[in-house]
Image (spheres, helix red, strand yellow):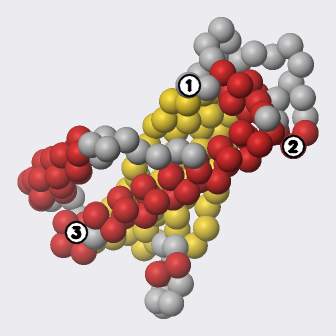
């Protein structure tokens, strides 16, 4: 249902490389940042399907929102990070913030997925220990899977 277009991820790869070079390997080291408690990655989408946007607006738990044509919905899901569960005294978590915005008079649905990793205890020297590529891969997979699964449900409701 929701697929990336060919070549669309190339700018993302460039941004990831720039982030690693400028932030992780430069600024954090230069300013001697030694503890990180959270890192996040926000992915934004615009869905330009008027029937899908309208269905979204009227679909939550069967509750119909009559006479409402503008909504900003945000919810969060937090769970233990699976790799930390096997380690003693490590309580890392994954936190995902979902934000859906439908504005009056605009037949588009804006979706933002903020994928976060929370480190408990704090991660020491992120540039030495944190695998940024794996984190981004998990964030991308989560975003794509979430959209594919949930948009298919909404499209079925719109039919």
Nearer the observer, disc 3 or disc 2? 2
Residue shown at 42% from the left, 55% from the top? 140
Residue, disc 1 = 48
Q: The C terminus lies in which quarter of the figure? A: top right
The earlier-in-sequence mark between 1 and 2 is 1
Q: Position of residue 56 (x, y in %)?
A: 73, 32
**With respect to residue 2, does 137 lie above or below?**
below
Q: Please provide percent x and percent y for residue 143.
A: 50, 52
Work out whether residue 49 or residue 46 is closer to the camera in this orientation and state it.
49
Residue at the (86%, 24%) spot, across then down: 65
Which of the two residues, 121 or 17, is positioned nearer the viewer here?
Answer: 17
CB contact under 8 Å: marks 1 and 2: no
Residue at 48%, 85% in the rendered image: 89
Which residue is label 3 attached to? 125
Q: Is residue 71 left or right of residue 92?
A: right
- Dot 2: element: helix
Bin the neighbour count of mark 2 within 10 Å (Cα to Cα): few under 14, some 14-19, many 20 and up. Answer: few
* Image disc number at residue 61: 2
Whether residue 102 is visible to the viewer of this picture, yes or no, is no
């Amino acid at each position: 249902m929701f697929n990336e277009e060919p070549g669309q991820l190339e700018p993302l790869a460039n941004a990831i490389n720039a982030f690693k070079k400028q932030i992780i390997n430069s600024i954090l080291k230069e300013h001697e940042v030694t503890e990180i408690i959270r890192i996040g990655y926000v992915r934004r989408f615009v869905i330009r399907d008027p029937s899908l946007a309208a269905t979204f607006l009227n679909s939550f738990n069967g509750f119909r929102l009559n006479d409402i044509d503008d909504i900003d919905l945000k919810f969060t899901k937090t769970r233990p990070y699976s790799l930390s569960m096997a380690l003693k005294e490590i309580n890392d978590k994954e936190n995902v913030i979902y934000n859906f915005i439908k504005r009056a008079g605009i037949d588009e649905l804006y979706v933002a997925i903020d994928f976060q990793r929370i480190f408990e205890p704090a991660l020491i020297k992120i540039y030495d220990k944190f695998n940024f590529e794996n984190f981004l891969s998990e964030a991308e997979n989560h975003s794509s899977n979430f959209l594919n699964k949930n948009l298919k449900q909404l499209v079925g409701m719109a039919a």
